Image (cartoon, helix red, strand yellow):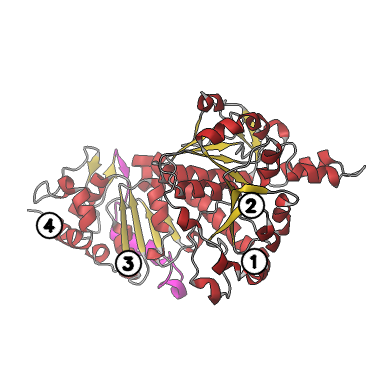
Amino acid sequence: MNSIWNKNIRLFCARFPGLYDLNRPLFSDDSNGPALPPDWELPDAKQGGKTLRENGIWLHSAYNPAGEAEKAAAALIKPDRASSSPLVFYGFGLGYGPIAAARLYPGSPLALIEPDARRFACALRVLDWEPVLSHPRCVLLINAAEQSVLSVLEDPLLGETSLKSMVFVDLPILQRHDQGYFAALKELVKRNIWKQQVNQNTKKKFSVLWERNRCRNAARLTELRGVRDFAGIAQDRPACVVAAGPSLEGILPHLRALQARCVLICVDTALRSVLRAGVEPDFIVLGDAQFWNARHLDGLAAPAATLVTEIAAYPSVFRFPCKEIVLFDSVHPALDAPVIASASKGALGAGGSVAATAWDFARLLDCPDIYLAALDLGFPARRSHARGSTFECQSHRESARLDTAETFGVRAIYSANTSVCADYMGNPLLSDERMNLYAWWFESKAASFPQHKTWSLTAESRAIPGVEYLPVERLEG
């Protein structure tokens, strides 16, 4: 009988009963634990204890694995942050690293990531995991999808929602068994660290504007309904989110047919073009508090449409002629606004683009299918916006002999580290860092909410993993 295994399983079952039940066949094979993988060797280390060799490659020290793990763990966190910095292990082999860290940092959260539950079970056969399994702030992410891991890492459960403040223990030798999984996960973490930095910079830049707008609009909180009143009202009807990419021109002739089949949700930047085509959307979404975003509504009216916005929108937005204005909770945390702290209207996501908020509103409506129209997230034919949009009209109004509309467009395309991606036809498409951030948001949401299938109706748009292309003509038929 393997006493180490039985002790570990007793502790594991008591601490993580749900994870134990999910993998019960592995943890209840017999009193000695599951069979070791055929490519594993467990020779004795020269200083005592077991070490691990896989396919002839040492995963831990052949001399003193426990001692070397303690030295490595001692260098992970500065002494003044030992009680606050979460430690995230990308793989762990037999577990020497997490065990040493659990002993050294009893107040620091631990997150252990391993896509292969059998490898974790085999590690419990070899070492005494009591320091980890009895650690008060330990999270085991065993056989979890990459997006699920990211959601846990960003959860306040770990005591720190900033990925940049976490310490990632990244030893490629411990990830050889599933390099694709760990590469995809690290890319997700890298993207979200960048996203958090962008959000932080945005807050620093616009916080004064947001607070001024909130104060001027405070009375609207009691006057207007919230988006939560619309939750689940379109369970049997798809939605079409109309964005303002250059491919919008090809969508405009189909808008009437789309509205006959779908809840038509238009972002503020596309409204001028949509109304010019003779179509009033069911909903208009405006999520940016800046004055220039309010200008998208200037001189327009949509008496049959509902405007979806937030309390920090520029005040003129609330004078827009429409059927109704409804609010969602501000995506910009209030610095000092106790008057609105208890006035929740319902939350909508924000992925840097108003189209992200529109997509999340369609999800709130519970639409089973969400069609994206003209969400290009790139520059088809080297154009930044559809003809007739507010941005394009502004470029012509402000053009001069030495600063033409074409110059305005070039600045828009090449101002944020231009890169190349692919559209739905496999053709190269110019994009940039901002568009990358938006695309990652839609990719993650498509994976997180598979019950709301997302499609793109424009072949010229950037191909987003998890979002399939559907010719708009198929919807008309």
For the residues carrying marks 3 and 4, which lies nearer the camera in this image?
3
For the residues carrying marks 2 and 3, which lies nearer the camera in this image?
2
For the residues carrying marks 4 and 2, which lies nearer the camera in this image?
2
* Residue 337 visible here: yes
Q: Earlier in the sequence, mark 3 or mark 4?
A: 4
Query: In the figure, is residue 353 to the left or right of 130?
Result: right
* Residue 423 visible here: no
Q: Is residue 413 above or below residue 158?
A: above
Q: Residue at x 29, y 60 (%)?
A: 66
For the residues carrying marks 1 and 4, which lies nearer the camera in this image?
1
Marks 2,3: beta carbons within 8 A: no
Q: Which residue is mark 4?
A: 6
Percent position of residue 275, x then y: 68, 40
Q: CA distance from mark 3 to mark 4?
A: 22 Å
- Mark 4 falls on what kind of element? helix
Q: Nearer the viewer, residue 27 or 302?
A: 302
Q: Earlier in the sequence, mark 2 or mark 3?
A: 3
Q: Callout 2: 10 Å neighbours few (<14), some, many (20+)? A: some
- Mark 2 falls on what kind of element? strand
Percent position of residue 306, x then y: 58, 51
Q: CA distance from mark 1 to mark 3?
A: 36 Å
Residue 137 numbered mark, or none:
3
Query: In the figure, is residue 400 to the left or right of 336?
Result: right
User: Callout 3, which amino acid?
Assistant: Arg
Instruction: Give the magenta-colored segment's residue range.
Output: 55-84
User: Callout 1, which amino acid?
Assistant: Trp
Percent position of residue 29, x then y: 11, 46
